[in-house]
Amino acid sequence: MRPATETIVKPLPSHLFTRHEGNAETRWEAMAGQGYHTPIDRFFVRNHTATPRLDAATWRLRLHGRGLRRDIELGYDQLRALPARTADVTLECAGNGRRFYDSQQHEAVPGIPWGLGAVGVARWRGVPLRDLLTMAGLRDGAVDVLATGLDAPYVHEGENLGHVRRPIPVRKALDDVLVAYEMNGEPLPMDHGFPARLIVPGWAGIASVKWLGDLEVSTTELRTPWNTLFYPGVTTMTVKSAFELPWPATLEAGRRHELRGRSWSGNGRVAHVEVSADNGATWHPAGRRGPRRDAWLTWGIAWTPREEGAHVLLARAVDESGAGQPPRRARHPFGYHFDAVVRHPVLVTRG
Ligand SMILES: Nc1nc2c(c(=O)[nH]1)N[C@H]1C(S)=C(S)[C@@H](COP(=O)(O)O)O[C@H]1N2
Ligand SMILES: [Mo]
């Protein structure tokens, strides 16, 4: 049984996760040897309050608002009976990589000090939001779709801000958003939004509202704390790269190591990745590993360290829009959008 203080239901062993109070970050070394998708047992969890235990038998999803011709209400079985789509999508917290503002750039920023592990790729299955909006009859004047979670209201600095909720524009809602009820072929786990959640590809994780209970379609632009106070102007995610190595890593000198990693971007596919083991003096193209790249790109490169001692490994990617990873990222007041090259410490030993 989980202790009463636990806000996450699934086990969080320390070889798979780093804990940040009620949140859990994936350890990148736990991705070594894994397939394309992040297994559920190591997928990061970001909860504003605590995972609620919802009952699919009584759960309802309501669609309503002035932007719709009629209100509709769906139960779990009704949702699952609708035509479904499956997609590999990256889910990433807006603050992923936040701690590097401080550790690499000496700029303190508030928020959860994530390393690079507040990201995962899963195979999501669900109903296109577009289909639900069409069922309810979208009016010409529809502007925003506001998704509200069924987890407990969020209290911030003594103020009750209500349920986690965040609008997305109708244009995005009609494009590629899913009301997902499966993750990697299993019913959505409790921590990841059971019975259903939004999946908003390319956008900061906050848009992918978990434990979805309500969708309001408005005819005016909507404002909630989650698109004004906490995530003003945050939509698509930036380019990042990570090595599937412990932090710090220890590698034996004089041996050939296959360094593996993954790179991803909210703008679309990753085009190519380069690695440097000499502080950025020379860069070497990493090779693709595995056929898929709808979400992140999996890559590898051989490295034979000669000298013992402290080293730094760098990886940088460029996506299909041409966006890359600079040596430094301009400070962001909330520590979002870190996309600078991360300096991964490696100790080379005689073995
Ligand atoms: N209802 C609800 N939805 C939510 C959240 C939440 O606390 N409550 N957290 C958001 C944030 S900030 C992120 S990064 C993602 C995390 O999804 P995961 O926990 O499945 O990895 O869910 C988003 N959806
Ligand atoms: Mo997040």
Image (cartoon, rainbow, N blue to C red):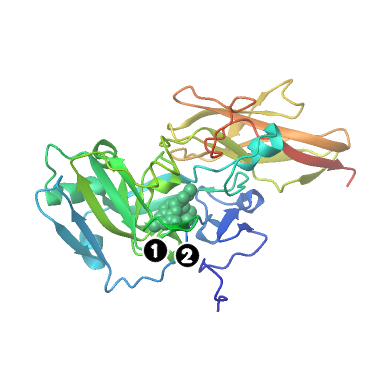
Report the residue that reaches farthest toward the front.
158
Circle 1 sits on which residue? 151
Looking at mark 1, is its residue's CB closer than 8 Å to ligand 1? yes
- Image marks 1 and 2: residues in contact by CB distance under 8 Å: yes
Q: In the rendered image of this protein, does residue 95 appear above or below residue 50? A: above
Nearer-the-camera pick, 216 or 178: 216
Who's the residue at 39% across and 47% down the image?
225
Q: Circle 1 sits in a helix, a strand or a loop, which is it?
A: loop
**Residue type beneath disc 1:** Asp
Which label belongs to residue 50?
A: 2
Who's the residue at 59% across and 28% down the image?
329
- Quadrant containing the N terminus in the rendered view: bottom right
Report the residue that reaches farthest toward the left.
69
Where is residue 283 shown, x and y percent of the image? 68, 23
Q: Residues within 10 Å of mark 2 (few under 14, many from 20)?
A: some
Who's the residue at 25% across and 48% down the image?
129
Report the residue that reaches farthest toward the bottom.
1
Nearer-the-camera pick, 45 or 142: 142
Q: Is residue 179 visible?
A: yes
